[in-house]
Amino acid sequence: MGLNNSQYDAIMRQYSKRQLAARHQLEEHRREAYGKIPQLSQIDRQVSSESLRCARRLLEDPAADTQELKSRMTGFSLQRAQLLREHGYPEDYLEMHYACPDCQDTGYQNGKKCHCFRQAAIDLLYTQSGMRRVLEEENFQTFSFDYYPEDMIHPTTGQSSRQMMQATVAACLRYIDEFDTHFSNLFFYGGTGLGKTFLSHCIARELIERTHSVIYYSAFELFEVAAKSAFNRDKEASEGRDYIFDCDLLIIDDLGTELTNSFVSSQLFLILNERIQAKKSTIISTNLSLPAFAETYSERVFSRITSQFQLFQLFGNDIRLQKKLQGS
């Protein structure tokens, strides 16, 4: 899921379009404002002239006192702001407006990719992978408790299938609301067709809409990227691996369905450990029971899960089978 050259170029073309649009907007604003308030163009010429004088003086004598020039420039700026206000314009009407003020629509800040670039990359990857369509269909607005029976009681908790799911959904909503202030991870386990993937999609949709970067991998895809990056020195896989460690939320779906070996176990521990140390959240779903999970992966992995994740067991009937029977 890393960016290839064409994907990178597509994002950079969008930044170029943003910069061009911002310049055109500023030119339009200037034409309009100068036409209605002729004094503005005179003030801007004076500001430009004073700025040039200040620059020349510093070139001739780096230790020169330019405070008087700076004070005059401040005075011009205040005059301009007052004129704009008096004629019903915002004070920043003649300033460049960027979609991302942090990088000024360049995609880079202090030599590093800006947060908006990262989000643009995630958005592009989701769009091209078809996940956007999935999230439009699988979200909290389309979620239903009707598939979780009230008369099906868990033998250990004594709660019904619906009560357990209601508590789980409530915890997920808190997780979303506290995402920026409280570091936490979620672990969904239970039989097939109980809504674990659906619930992960619900959370992903909400966090993406709040401009958080979210990456979704099936367990097979995740370890395939890890293997290509480690053994083949695959550039695309290496970029994908970077996103695995850096994204705000990593979703690992169907853990336990992949071919498990020492490499998989060590990579899973590395990913979880690095993300925990960086306080980057992770959601895991698995069809395995907790004892089976402990047997499948190393003790270190199981320890990280039980100590650093909120564990939720989903209990009920296979929803996919219910939908199929309803459809027929």
Image (cartoon, grey):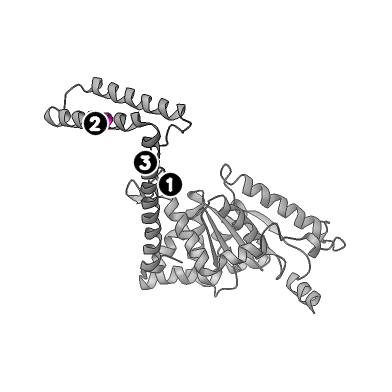
Instruction: Please tell me which residue lies in front, 15 or 200.
Output: 15
Q: Which residue is mark 1?
A: 100
Q: Which residue is mark 3?
A: 31
- Secondary structure under tag 3 reads helix
Q: What range of the chain is rendered magenta?
A: 45-50
Q: Quick check: 46 above or below 250?
A: above
Q: CA distance from mark 3 to mark 2?
A: 22 Å
Judge from the rendering whether residue 95 lies leftward or rightward of residue 260; answer left or right: left
Q: Which residue is mark 2?
A: 51
Q: Quick check: 107 above or below 222?
A: above
Picture coordinates of residue 319 (x, y %)? 75, 70
Picture coordinates of residue 326 (x, y %)? 80, 74
Magenta part, dominant SS: helix
Mark 2 nearby-residue class (10 Å; few <14, some 14–19, many ≥20) = some
Q: Quick check: 118 above or below 253?
A: above
Residue for point 76% across, 54% down: 166
Q: CA distance from mark 1 to mark 3?
A: 24 Å
